[in-house]
Amino acid sequence: MTITSAAPTDQATFRDLFAVGEFRALFASYGIFMIGETVKMLALSVLVYQRTNSPLLAALAYVAGFLPSVVGGMFLLAYADRWRPRTVMVGYDLIRVVTVVVLAIGVLPPVGALALVFTVGLVSPVAAAARTALLPDLLAGDRYVLGRALFTITAGATQVLGFAVGGALIGLLGPYGALWITAVTCLTSAVLIRFGLSDRPARVVGAAVTGGAVRETWRVNRRLLADPPVRGLLLATWLPGALLVGAEGVVVPYAGGEGAAGVLFMAGAGGMLLGDLVVGRWVAPARRESLTPWLALLLGVPMLAFVADLGLLVAAVLFGAATFGFSYHLGLARRFLDAVPADRRGQAFGLSHMGMMTGQGLAAGAAGLVAEWVAPGLVMAGFGALSLAATLLLWRQLRVPPMNVPRHA
């Protein structure tokens, strides 16, 4: 039986969030971090392509900072709870400063640059988990859920801004100059965290630290996945959304042109950002949680129409409506926080993020493979149907449970 605490009755506002000084520092550092990472990967991709003329290596350069996060999440997440959160975040930012400076100097060959970025990416999930786990320490009740929504909105918006800024910087200063600017963003993020956040202790200390970090990561991951309520919430977080990302993976062949694909991608990003904004800010906490399974259904239902020959405008509206459903995650946020042990919060959030990234990558790859033999529209409709089926199978985990008793202190 899934048990959770009751939803908060007071609805948070953005003013409530920014009244907390430490949240302002964390939020500002995150926005700068996202812009810097986007500019870095774009500049590195351009740089590698200029030096090798290889589209494959250029593509690998763009994803080199993201792929290793899955590996790091499997083996290193225990450090998110073993080390002080401020130390983890500042340390990672300083590692990023050194990495970007080395790239900007240009002393490494393209393969060496890719290897360096890949290696540094292994520790990125530890810092991300420490940041996410810190949020409920700064924001209580519905402020935490709205804070999660704001971070999601910021991630999408700053990536778009990062592409624009990165393109302008590369055009003006070249890829090496853009990398030097990125180094400044890394240092700025470190300063904001160091002087804007209190130095909180590690969540796991003393006798609770058992064995090496790799063994501890595996042990705690198994423990979390063996807990039925936690496992159910993780699957509910991962599957419906990942299957929609599978449909998104064949947007380019479906659209048949860069311009049309860009319209669909913009509609998808806009729908997701609008969903987080509307559901996070203007839907009451209890209502938001009761709407969770219905919002998850919205991921798949509009995609079924892609079996037909749709016009671009209709396809964009339907795709935006589907991605609006990603806001179902907000209805799970408080319940997941209540379900996981407080001293393993960092690793729990890291596991959730790792599984989400893995599922999305696998779904997009599978959709691309199927599209080699099946029309892209049918593939998009098929993955929409799979998302719908996953939502129905996970309905019990998605809906608000009948009993409201805390599971973990």
Image (cartoon, helix red, strand yellow):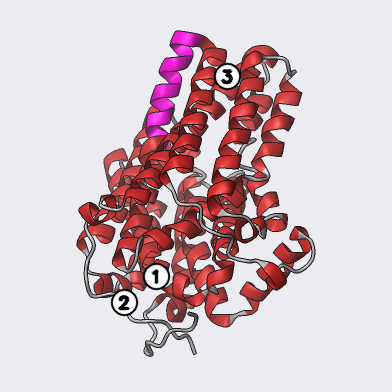
- Choose the circle earlier in sequence order: 3 or 1: 3
Which mark is in front, 2 or 3?
A: 2
On screen, 257 above or below 276?
A: above
Classify mark 2: residues with Cα within 10 Å, few (<14), some (14-19) or many (20+).
some
**Residue 383 is a magenta residue:** no
Q: Residue at x 66, y 21 (%)?
A: 102
**Residue 163 is a magenta residue:** yes
Q: Residue at x 57, y 52 (%)?
A: 357
Label 1–label 2 contact, CB within 8 A:
yes
- Choose the circle earlier in sequence order: 2 or 3: 2
Q: Residue at x 50, y 52 (%)?
A: 199
Disc assigned to residue 46: 3
Answer left or right for 176 relative to 245: right
- In the image shown, does 106 or 66 lie closer to the viewer? 106
Residue range of the region highlighted in magenta in the rendering: 159-173
Classify mark 1: residues with Cα within 10 Å, few (<14), some (14-19) or many (20+).
many
Which mark is in front, 3 or 1?
A: 1
Disc assigned to residue 334: 1
Answer left or right for 90 relative to 402: right
Classify mark 3: residues with Cα within 10 Å, few (<14), some (14-19) or many (20+).
many
Q: Residue at x 44, y 56 (%)?
A: 381
Q: Position of residue 223 (x, y in %)?
A: 66, 75
The answer to whether residue 103 of the structure is visible from this angle is yes
Q: Secondary structure at mark 3?
A: helix
On screen, 199 above or below 188?
A: below
Amino acid, disc 1: Arg
In which quadrant of the rendered view does residue 267 lie? top left
- Choose the circle earlier in sequence order: 1 or 2: 2
Check disc 2 and report the residue beneath it. 7
On screen, 5 above or below 384?
A: below
